[in-house]
Amino acid sequence: IAGITQAPTSQILAAGRRMTLRCTQDMRHNAMYWYRQDLGLGLRLIHYSNTAGTTGKGEVPDGYSVSRANTDDFPLTLASAVPSQTSVYFCASTPRASGGHNEQFFGPGTRLTVL
Amino acid sequence: GQNIDQPTEMTATEGAIVQINCTYQTSGFNGLFWYQQHAGEAPTFLSYNVLDGLEEKGRFSSFLSRSKGYSYLLLKELQMKDSASYLCGVMDSNYQLIWGAGTKLIIKP
């Protein structure tokens, strides 16, 4: 692994089903983020984690949950998917949670369709 | 509330110069980022500004005026591969990145 990976690449899901999107980074970054990207709305933060063992809510957390059991992995779970959760989901990481020039590195994204 | 504004779409000619503007209103300011995103791909980092003035990196430059809540990304000698969306993001007082909706740049031969 080099950088940050996400799985699956794409998924079609029936409404009401549970789904976990996976995100793994091998850069030993402390902070990780989940965004959704919808046409005309840009990137919106769902949940974040400043360090392993801690998580926080972003702008649009409802219907999603996350965990951060270790530094490398940050899965995003949809407990009961709804069509409004159809989106492209990006995972990102940064070396630290705060500080100035703290660029975010993005995974390749997961395209999720909920029918 | 927090708000980042940038044009939805711009068109430019290969070899020309284009300026993409971004205005922002956020709770605090800890820097402004520009990212490039090709269709179907992940955003990739272009530039970071935290102090007023111009940062130049090859064909790309980024300018910041904190007093005006304004930034622009300047792309020179445009190439077809520059066709992409350009995302403006501002880091607020909590070190969270607030993103604009992105500007889709179309380059014509």
Image (cartoon, grey):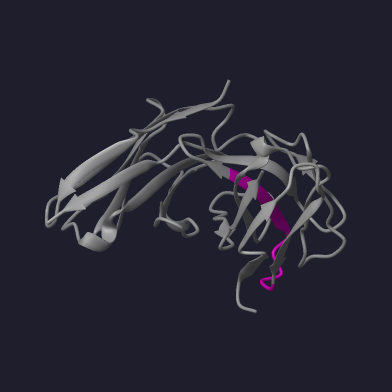
Choose between A105 and A75: the one closer to the eye. Answer: A75
Q: Quadrant of residue B70?
A: top left
Asked whether residue B54 appears in the rendered view, the answer is no
User: How many tags in the picture?
Assistant: 0
Toward the top, the furthest residue is B1
Q: Quadrant of residue A71?
A: bottom right
Magenta span of residues: A26-36
Could you tell me which residue is drawn at 87 percent across and 61 percent down?
A69
The quadrant of the picture occupied by the C terminus of chain B is bottom left
Percent across and percent down for residue A11 are: 65, 57
Q: Residue furthest bottom?
A: A1
Return the x and y of residue A51 as percentages of the image width and height. Answer: 79, 56
Instruction: Answer left or right for B10 relative to A24.
Output: left
Q: Is residue A24 visible?
A: yes
Q: Is residue B26 left or right of residue B22?
A: right
The residue lying toward the viewer, choosing from B9 and A8, is A8
Residue drawn at point x = 63 percent, y = 34 percent: B93
Quarter containing the N terminus of chain B: top right
B78 in the magenta segment: no
Residue B66 percent coordinates (x, y): 42, 31
**Going by the image, does A87 lie left or right of B108?**
right
Question: Residue A20: where, in percent of width, then height?
Answer: 78, 56
Residue at x 47% of width, y 60% of height: B41
Q: Does the magenta stretch include residue A30?
A: yes
Residue at 40% in and 26% down? B67
Vertical order, B13 against B51 (above or below): below
**Does B13 sit above or below residue A26?**
above
Q: Which of A44 and A89 lies nearest the eye of the viewer?
A: A89
Q: Which of B13 and B3 is in front in this view?
A: B13
Above or below, A37 against A71 in this view is above
